[in-house]
Image (spheres, grey):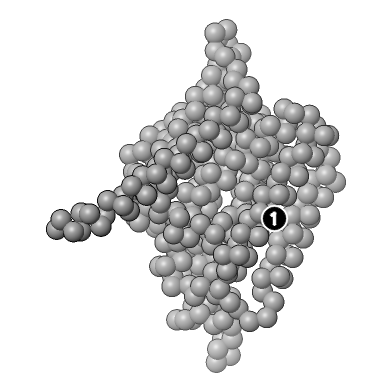
Amino acid sequence: MNIPAWGWAAVIVGLLVILAFDLWIVDRGEAKEFSLRQAGFWVGFYVALAVLFGIGLLIFAGPTKSGEFFAGYLTEYSLSVDNLFIFFIIMSRFAVPKEYQHRVLLIGILIALVMRGIFIAIGAAALNEFHWLFYVFGIFLVYTAYTLIRDHGKHEDDFAENILLRAARRWFRTTPDFVGHKTIVKIDGKRMVTPMLIVMIAIGTTDLLFALDSIPAIFGLTQDAFIVFTANAFALMGLRQLYFLLGGLLQRLVYLSYGLAFILAFIGAKLVLEAAHDTVSWAPEIPISVSLGVIIVTMVVTTVLSLMKSRKDALAAPAEAEQH
């Protein structure tokens, strides 16, 4: 779509207003732990916004663009669920008090959104200029799918401090403990940053590393930079509340990596086939309706099988304990 500058500006300003309103609502009064009821409301709110945006695209841009948005949104949201494992590890490693975790996630995700926007702009320009990058992205996604299966169940070792986080630790004086939800404080006349700022940087920059597979994945569904950006934005905006809503449920999604691996492999193959379509007559073009159906069915089947397996294991555990 040829979106004018004012259209981009309107969407970005609208997203920032929503995030600012979200932050204002959450931060009113004393800091307190995010409740399941709050999390459920906000997850529903952000999903509803994404659905309304997709319906708007259906009305003003047609079913193809709307389908691309929903396929991209579901793909990004699904891949983001896997990121939540790492967010749990980061929160635990930095011992973030529960009442401040929602603020950490909001600012961290805002950092991630800005960095993804830059990454998307570069990726869109590169793909437009160098057609062979579609093959690179496709092969990379298939390889990523393989690594997800190979490293299934190894989430506890996934987090390592990246170069930006290490630089922040080295450059800034840091207080030993959290000082409320403040990121910068003045102690004995010297300005210092708190662990709150460090963990926000950790969330934002770690998410960018995950974007190395999620951004190529959505470019496999659409090359429209506007749709790529908005699908990422809506997926990230609802991620914070999903963190609190899912909680221990994440541990029960035992087949999540397999489902994500299948989606990435499918999109990778789709990228390669569509890149080859211009030169090889037999290479098919996979319509967006098929891609959307594959993504939905895969995530539903993955979730159902995971919950069935977890329930079976939970029922078997008492019997095994009794035998021992």
Spot occupied by residue 249 in the image (x, y as percentages of width and height):
45, 55
Seen in the picture, residue 23 relative to 10 is either above or below; the reply is: below
Q: Nearer the viewer, residue 167 or 135?
A: 135
Q: Nearer the viewer, residue 78 or 167?
A: 78
Residue 279 placement: quadrant: top right
Spot occupied by residue 65 in the image (x, y as percentages of width and height):
73, 31
Seen in the picture, residue 53 relative to 274 is either above or below; the reply is: below
Residue 273 placement: quadrant: top right
The crowding category of the residue bearing disc 1, from other C-alpha atoms within 10 Å (few below 14, some 14 to 19, many at least 20), is: few
Task: Identify the residue shown where x is 84% and y is 40%.
Answer: 4
Seen in the picture, residue 116 relative to 22 is either above or below; the reply is: above
Q: Nearer the viewer, residue 163 or 198?
A: 198
**Image side of residue 264 versus residue 21, left or right:** left
Task: Identify the residue shown where x is 44% and y is 54%.
Answer: 250
Task: Identify the residue shown where x is 62% and y is 37%.
Answer: 72
Spot occupied by residue 151 in the image (x, y as percentages of width and height):
34, 43
Task: Identify the residue shown where x is 58% and y is 69%.
Answer: 34
Q: Outermost residue toward the left?
A: 324
Mark 1, residue position? 45
**Image side of residue 287 versus residue 318, left or right:** right
Circle 1: element type = helix
Q: Quadrant of the C terminus?
A: bottom left
Q: Quadrant of the N terminus?
A: top right
Residue 133 placement: quadrant: top right
Q: Nearer the viewer, residue 45 or 278?
A: 45
**Image side of residue 309 versus residue 134, left or right:** left
The residue under label 1 is which amino acid type? Phe
Can residue 136 be spotted in the picture?
Answer: no
Spot occupied by residue 81 in the image (x, y as percentages of width and height):
51, 49
Q: Outermost residue toward the bottom?
A: 188
